Amino acid sequence: MIMNITLDPLTRIEGHLSIKVDVDNNKVVKAECAGEMFRGFELLLRGRHPMDAHMITQRICGVCPIDHGMASTSAQEAAFRVSPPTNGRLLRNLIQGANYVHSHIVHFYQLSALDFIDVTAIIGYTGKDDALLLLQDWVKSQLQSEKIFPAAPFLPRYEGTYAADAELNVMALKHYLDAMTMRRQAHEAAAMFSGKIPHSTSLMPGGVTELARANTLAAYRSIAERLRAFVVGVYMPDVIAVAKAFPQYFTYGRGPDTYLSYGGFPENDARTEFLLPSGVVRKGALEVFDASHIGEEVKHSLFNSKSGLHPSRGETLPEPGKSDAYSWLKAPRYDGQPMEVGPLARFMVALLKTPKSPTVVLGQDILSQLKLGPEVLNSVLGRHLVRALECKAVVERMLDWVDQTTPGELTFKEFELPQEGEGMGLTEAARGALGHWISVKKGVIDNYQCVVPTTWNASPRDDHDVAGPIEQALVGTPIADPKNPVEAARVVRSFDPCLACAIH
Ligand code: NFE
Ligand code: MG
C-alpha cells in the first residue's frame, strides 16, 4: 500500500519548503518538492534606477547576500561596460570567501549535524566544560518539563537511528557551540571590507568602495587563520566521523548525475579563470558551459509566463491556483535537463577539469581511506564531504588573496552610467550556480531576472514532467518509520536548500 508522507515545513533549512513523498514498502517511490510562497523581487526591480539592483537583490537572502551582490554587480558591470580593478576583484573574493565559510559551517553544524548526532547524549556527560554543562542542564530541565517545545531547537526531532558513540555525540555538540563563534568571526571578517554583513554597503558595480588598508588586511588574515584552523582541525574530521558512523548514506540521495558550475572566485581580472572551475558534467563527461542553453520551464510552476524562456528574456507572471502546478519555483533546465548545482557539482567539474588540484587529490585520499571511490559522492554524505573540502579550499585561498592585495591601490573604477544596456552576471553562490540578468532602457531597469541555486536543485517537474534534482534524489530512500521520516529529511538537507532564495 502506498503511504503519503508530508514534511511541511521542513525545518533546519532556510525558508518554506514542503516535501511530499509516496512511500511503498518502506521506500520512497515518488517525491514532490514545493516552494510555498511568492516574493516578487524581479517585479519590484522594474522601473527602478539600475544602481538599486545590487542593494535590493542582496535582500533576497540573509545567508548568501554577498553572492547575490556579486551576481548583481557583475550583471550591472556587463551592462555599464566597466569591471573592477585587481584590488576590487580581490576584496570581493575576500568578502565572498568569508561569506562562504560562514554558510558552510552553519550548514553542517547548525542545520545538518542534528540529523546524525544524538543531542540526548549530553545527559550522560560527566566532564567539566562550562558550555556543555549549561547545555546539559537545559536539555535535562526541558525534557523533565511539560513544555510544548522542549529544548528547541534540539528537541523534538524525528526519532530514528542517531550516532551511538557517546564521545562522538558530546564532541560534536561542543563543536556545534564552537561553530557559532566561528560563524560570527567569518561575518566579522567579511564586514571588514563589505561595510556591514549581511547586505554589503561597499559592494558596487566597478569594485568595492572600502579601501585596501594594510591594518585591515592583517586583521582579516588573523581571523581567516582561525577559521582555517577550525575547518581543517574540526569541521573536516567531524564530517569524516559522521561518514564512518553512517556509511549507508553514501548510497542514499542520488541526484540526476548532471552537474553545472558557472565558475566561482575569479583568479584573473578578465574573470575567465576561477578557484572553483566552470563546466557542465553529463554522462560522466566534462563540457564547456554555455549560458545560451539555460531556459526556465513553468508547466508545473505557479506562473503563466511562456515556458522555456532564456532568463535574458525571462518573465515573472504569477498565477496562484494554476492547475497542475504545485510550486512557486520555476524549473530551470540546461538543454531541457535538470542539473544539480552546489559543492557536489563544483567537485564533479573539478574532478574532470583540475584532477591534480589539492582539493580533488585530498578528496580522493579521504575516499580511499574509507575504501570508496568517487562514484559514491552522488549521495547525502558525498555532498557533506565535498562541501567541507570546498570550505577548506576557500579558506586557504583567502590567505593568498590577502597577500595578493596591494595596500593603497584602487579598489573601485569610476564609470559613466549608460541609458541603455544589457548584462548577465554569473557567480557560484555557496549553494551553487547563481545568475542575474539585467536589461536597462531609458535609464531604468526594464527587466531583471534571477536564476538561483536552490531554484535549480529544488525545482518542480518540468515541461516533460521530469522531476527536479531533490525530487529525484528522494526516490529510493528507505523510510523505516513513516511517522519519523528522518531519512528523507537527511536527503533534502544534504543539498543545503534555501527557499527564500529559490522563490525570490
Ligand atoms: Ni538563501 Fe543562496 C546561496 C543564493 S541559495 S542561500 O548560496 O543565491 O539558492
Ligand atoms: Mg527568477
Image (cartoon, helix red, strand yellow):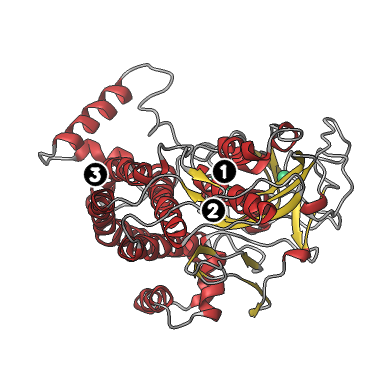
Marks 1 and 2 close (CB-CB < 8 Å): yes
- Camera-side mark, 1 or 3: 1
Q: Is residue 168 left or right of residue 428?
A: left
Residue 378: where, in percent of width, then height?
55, 67
- How far across and down, in percent of the image, does residue 132 sit? 20, 37
Residue where numbered disc 2 is placed: 431
Q: Residue at x 45, y 62 (%)?
A: 86
Q: Which residue is mark 1?
A: 498
Q: Is residue 51 above or below residue 308?
A: above
Q: Give the quadrant of residue 285.
A: bottom right
Find numbered disc 2 in the image and state the secondary structure of the residue it sits on: loop
- Taking the spot 40% from the left edge, 38% from the top edge, the residue there is 195
In terms of depth relative to the viewer, which is nearer, 48 or 6?
48
Q: CA distance from mark 3 to mark 2?
A: 26 Å
Q: Indicate if the residue with disc 2 has its beta carbon within 8 Å of ligand 1.
A: yes
Q: Are marks 1 and 3 in contact (CB under 8 Å)?
A: no
Q: Is residue 486 visible?
A: yes
Disc 2 marks which amino acid? Arg
SS class, disc 3 = helix
Name the residue furthest left.
Answer: 128
Q: Which residue is more in the foreground, 258 or 77?
A: 77
N-terminal-most mark, 3 or 2: 3
Element on which disc 1 rests: loop
Mark 2 crowdedness (10 Å alpha carbons): few <14, some 14-19, many ≥20: many
* Residue assigned mark 3: 174
User: What distance separates the C-alpha of mark 1 from that of mark 3?
Assistant: 26 Å
Disc 3 residue type (three-letter): Lys
Q: Is residue 377 left or right of residue 233?
A: right
Using residue 348 as the reference point, say whether residue 196 is left or right of it.
Answer: left
